[in-house]
Amino acid sequence: MAVNYICRHCKTSIGSIEGNTVTERELGFHSLTPEERSDIIAYDSSGNVTVKVVCDYCNEALSSNPDLMLIGNPLQ
């Protein structure tokens, strides 16, 4: 199993965690609501997990230009 982190806006790979040693509790997934889980986390048939977060570049761009939040895919 791998946990892959990607930016939800620019789709850049941010990092990954390999192996079965990490739990959802250790990753903090247990504190998410069901709606947040479905928006942030995706599972594939191989047992790999993709977590959509915001990279530093996109976070800075959105902070500097809040109007971009009104666009569906502002930084692609």
Image (cartoon, grey):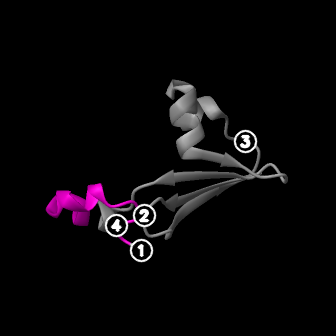
| Whether label 2 touches label 4, CB < 8 Å | yes
Residue pointed to by mark 4? 74
Q: Is residue 26 left or right of residue 60?
A: right
> Mark 3 or mark 1, which has the lower sequence index?
3
Marks 1/4: CA–CA distance:
6 Å
Residue type, label 3: Thr
Residue pointed to by mark 1? 76
Residue pointed to by mark 3? 21
Residue pointed to by mark 2? 9
Residue type, label 1: Gln
> Mark 2 or mark 4, which has the lower sequence index?
2
Is residue 52 found inside the magenta-colored segment of the image?
no
Q: Residue furthest right?
A: 46
Marks 3/2: CA–CA distance:
29 Å
Secondary structure at numbered mark 3: loop
Asked if 34 appears above or below 9 in the picture, the reply is above
Determine crowd level at label 3: few under 14, some 14-19, many 20+ residues with C-alpha closer than 10 A. few
Marks 1/2: CA–CA distance:
6 Å
Is residue 69 found inside the magenta-colored segment of the image?
yes
Question: Is any part of residue 69 visible from this angle?
Answer: yes
What range of the chain is rendered magenta? 60-75
Secondary structure at numbered mark 4: loop
